[in-house]
Amino acid sequence: MVNGSMCILSDKDILRSMENGRLGITDYNERGLTPNGYDLRVSEISIRGKEGLIKDGIASIPPRTMFYVSTIERVRMPSDVCAQLWLRTTWIRKGVMGAFGKIDAGFEGTLTLGAYNASDDAVEIPIKERFCQMVFETLHSTAEKSYSERSGNYQGQTGVTLNPKNDL
């Protein structure tokens, strides 16, 4: 924190936080580290209207189709850090749109990301490819109650998860 304001963690801050155990990124890959974040990779893809999950090779997303991506990395957030998620511009340039929320302080699990192929052409997304960037922000103060204590609907999730625990 700088002068009591929120700040974004640099690559050095991310590595230091992982080394001292404050922040967790399982299946960490050096290629994913950016100057101010970390790129999350595709573990599996679910295409709306199609049965099954694509876990190997390349997923071909039909034009004008919603799809869901689960991350390889499992993240563990401390109680004073949250993260923004940004679609990599590589995918934006191919017509993919994504509307992602923040990763709450105290969240632990893989992430399920919703996206849409807005183009008139199929978009091919290789499994294990970088999909979005996670940008860590420090909170002004530690959260009184972490994600797991507030709703925790997706706490501990693994793989594409479309229904929160409370709805099952």
Image (cartoon, grey):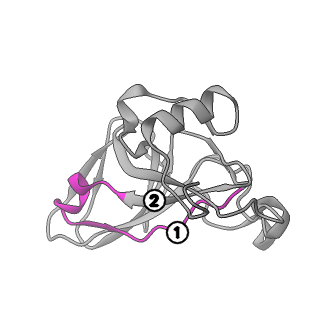
- Image coordinates of residue 40 in percent, x first then y, are 44, 44
Label placed on residue 85: 2
Q: How many marks?
A: 2
The stretch in magenta equals 87-105
Of labels 2 and 1, earlier in sequence is 2
Question: On the rendered image, what quadrant is the C terminus found in?
Answer: bottom right
Q: Is residue 113 left or right of residue 93?
A: right
- Image coordinates of residue 57 in percent, x first then y, are 33, 35
Q: With respect to residue 91, does 166 lie above or below?
A: below
Circle 1 residue: 101
Q: With respect to residue 137, does 127 lie above or below?
A: above
Residue under the image location 14 percent in, 71 percent down: 120
Question: On the rendered image, what quadrant is the N terminus found in?
Answer: bottom right
Residue under the image location 77 percent in, 64 percent down: 165
Residue toward you, 27 or 65: 27
Residue 26 can be seen in this image: no
Marks 2/1: CA distance?
Answer: 7 Å
Q: Are marks 2 and 1 in contact (CB under 8 Å)?
A: yes
